[in-house]
Structure formats: structure tokens, C-alpha cells
Image (cartoon, rainbow, N blue to C red):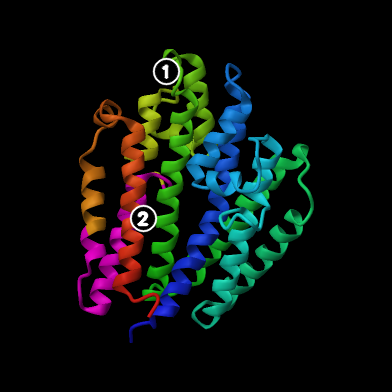
């Protein structure tokens, strides 16, 4: 029997916001790492790039008049006025999980609830800059725990697929945004491209998405921008790459097509995006403009999300 649209909606957004909480922590981590390596520019400019890539610059400027590092970090992690902050995301994830509680295993619901309590307790207090790294690691650890329980206890049915779709739509969006932060930081200084500083910053991006060791296994361990871009965008074996995310999105949509005995527009859009990623090369992406490629990818990824909501009547 097909799920009600509001149940599918709750599962999809529960997973999106759990992933978003982790991803916002990773985005802040990327900003922190780049601000420590790019000493030739003002640090606030780099944090501004994080706001832009997160899509929350306008919301930030509605509340603050200056690009202050401490205010930006607080806005991204703790601020309830920012619906994409870690605190807001984990609140929304838990709220959606509570609405679809009967569709979740007991272990999964209890893990979501416990993680919400732990993260909320830590973020209720003002941020101490010295503790920032520990807080980011806490968020990543708790969301990884939720993901582990999800994969270890959930039946592989349409409930699993709607959760999977939410997680990978959000993850693809975030990987593109983290890459865009790197593009923004060195954009004014083309002379830095290919330098030791450039390569060190790419290595920092790898660490921020927990892909540092995986990169060393896949390549020869030397930090080369072309290889790192290929790894994070096009490598089908990296769980955070754009290509891997879309393989998983396409697979879940195929399972739903079989279960619902119909093929929706979202499946065709996702398949087209998967094919474009499969046929792309790093050289073509860079020659055509990496920022433009990422910007277009984010737009298309949002289109897939909208079409999923329309196809499965999320708001009916």
C-alpha cells in the first residue's frame, strides 16, 4: 500500500534536516580551515563566502550589519532565526520524525531523540571559539550515529527510499556548496591556482568532508586540484560525491517506480542529471566554469526535490 503524501513528506524532510545539520557543521568546518590557510585575504570575506554558499546571506544581513566572524558562526550553528542552522535543522528533523514515528523503528526514533537532546544541550550555551572544533565533531558524530541506526534497522521499503531521497538530495546540495566555497575563496587570485597554498586548501576541503584518507587510497596521495575535484564531483565510490549521490537517488526512485507502478517526471530529471555527471570530465567542468557548473547543479538538484514532492503529493 502506498504511503500517504504527508508521511512521505515527513520522512523525506526528517532525513534532509538530519543531513543538513551535519552538512552545516561541515560547511563551517570548511570555512574555518580555509580561513586558517588563506592568510592573504581578510577572514570575514571568507566567512561571507560561507554565508553565500549556504544560501543564507540575505537572512544574516537582515539581522546583522557587518560580516563579523563570531556572529556568522553563531548564525550558522545556533540561531533559531536561521532555519538552516544546526540547531534549527536538528529541531525540525526531530519534529518531522515525531510526526512519522510509527514509520520508524524504535531504535531509530530513540537515537534521533537522544541526538537532538545532546546537540540542543551543547548549542543552548553561547559558543566558545576554543570549543568550535569539538562542537562540530559532536554534530558530525551524532548525525553519523543516526545514519548508522537507520541503515542497520530499517526495512528496505518505500519508507527507506523516501528517507534515502531526502538524505542524498541534501548531501549533493552540500557537497556542491562546499566546493563553491573553495572556488569563491581563490576567485580574486587566479595566480594562486595550482600553488602549494591552493593544494593545501583543497586538502582542507577533503578533511572537512571526511574524505582525506579515502582520497589517498583512490589516488597516489598527492594533492592535485584536478584529482580532488574529480573525487568530490565525479567519483562513484565516494559516498559524498555528486555522482554517488545521484546513483543512490536514481536507484531509490526506480524502487518507488516499481512499488507505485508508475514513472514520474522526477525519475527522468534525476536520470538525466546522473547521465550528465557520468559523461562529464574535470577538464570540461573547469573550462566551462566550475562556479557555473556548481550553480547549475544546485538549481537542477532543487528541481529534482520539487518534482519528488509534486509526484508523491507531499502536500496533499
Q: Main secondary structure of the magenta part?
A: helix
Q: Which residue is mark 2?
A: 302
Residue at 34%, 63% in the rendered image: 306
CA gap between label 2 and label 1 equals 30 Å
| Residue 273 in view of the camera | yes
**Which residues, given as a range, are shown in magenta?**
239-268
Residue at 57%, 49% in the rendered image: 59
* Position of residue 39 measured from the top left corner of the image (x, y, whole percent): 61, 18
- Secondary structure under the numbered disc 2 in the rendered image: helix
* Position of residue 213 measured from the top left corner of the image (x, y, whole percent): 50, 35
Residue at 39%, 69% in the rendered image: 162
Q: Earlier in the sequence, mark 2 or mark 1?
A: 1
Q: Tell me if residue 101 is in the magenta stretch.
A: no
Tag nearer the camera, 2 or 1: 2
Q: Nearer the viewer, residue 71 or 34?
A: 71
Q: Nearer the viewer, residue 115 or 35?
A: 35
Q: Residues within 10 Å of mark 2 (few under 14, many from 20)?
A: some
| Residue 157 in view of the camera | no
Q: Which residue is mark 1?
A: 193
Q: Tell me if residue 252 is in the magenta stretch.
A: yes
* Position of residue 21 measured from the top left corner of the image (x, y, whole percent): 57, 55
Q: Is residue 245 above or below residue 179?
A: below
Q: Is residue 154 above or below residue 210?
A: below
Q: Quadrant of the N terminus?
A: bottom left
| Image-based side of 253 in relation to 167, left or right | left
* Position of residue 290 measured from the top left corner of the image (x, y, whole percent): 34, 32
**The quadrant where residue 313 appears:** bottom left
Q: Nearer the viewer, residue 60 or 23?
A: 60
Q: Residues within 10 Å of mark 1 (few under 14, many from 20)?
A: few
Residue at 48%, 61% in the rendered image: 16
Q: Is residue 106 above or below residue 286?
A: below
Q: Quadrant of the C terminus?
A: bottom left
Amino acid at each position: 500500500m502506498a504511503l500517504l503524501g504527508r508521511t512521505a513528506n515527513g520522512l523525506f524532510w526528517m532525513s534532509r534536516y538530519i543531513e543538513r545539520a551535519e552538512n552545516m557543521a561541515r560547511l563551517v568546518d570548511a570555512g574555518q580551515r580555509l580561513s586558517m590557510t588563506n592568510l592573504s585575504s581578510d577572514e570575514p570575506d571568507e566567512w561571507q563566502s560561507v554565508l553565500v554558499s549556504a544560501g543564507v546571506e540575505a537572512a544574516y544581513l537582515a539581522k546583522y550589519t557587518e560580516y563579523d566572524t563570531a556572529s556568522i558562526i553563531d548564525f550558522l550553528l545556533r540561531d533559531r532565526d536561521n532555519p538552516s542552522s544546526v540547531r534549527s535543522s536538528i529541531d525540525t528533523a526531530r519534529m518531522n520524525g515525531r510526526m512519522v514515528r510509527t514509520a520508524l523503528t524504535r531504535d531509530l526514533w530513540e537515537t534521533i531523540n537522544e541526538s537532538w537532546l545532546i546537540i540542543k544541550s551543547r548549542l543552548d550555551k553561547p559558543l566558545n571559539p576554543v570549543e568550535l572544533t569539538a562542537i562540530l565533531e559532536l554534530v558530525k558524530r551524532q548525525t553519523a550515529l543516526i545514519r548508522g541506526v537507520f541503515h542497520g534497522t530499517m526495512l528496505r521499503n518505500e519508507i527507506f527510499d523516501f528517507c534515502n531521497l531526502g538524505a542524498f538530495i541534501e548531501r549533493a546540495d552540500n557537497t556542491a556548496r562546499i566546493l563553491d566555497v573553495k572556488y569563491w575563496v581563490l576567485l580574486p587570485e587566479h595566480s594562486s591556482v595550482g600553488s602549494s597554498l591552493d593544494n593545501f586548501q583543497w586538502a582542507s576541503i577533503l578533511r572537512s568532508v571526511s574524505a582525506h584518507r579515502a582520497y589517498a587510497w583512490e589516488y597516489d596521495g598527492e594533492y592535485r586540484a584536478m584529482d580532488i575535484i574529480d573525487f568530490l564531483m565525479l567519483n562513484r565510490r565516494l559516498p559524498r560525491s555528486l555522482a554517488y549521490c545521484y546513483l543512490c537517488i536514481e536507484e531509490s526512485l526506480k524502487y518507488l517506480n516499481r512499488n507505485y507502478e508508475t514513472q514520474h517526471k522526477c525519475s527522468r530529471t534525476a536520470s538525466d542529471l546522473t547521465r550528465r555527471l557520468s559523461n562529464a570530465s574535470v577538464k570540461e567542468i573547469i573550462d566551462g566554469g566550475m562556479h557555473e557548473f556548481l550553480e547549475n547543479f544546485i538549481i537542477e538538484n532543487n528541481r529534482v526535490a520539487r518534482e519528488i514532492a509534486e509526484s508523491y503529493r507531499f502536500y496533499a
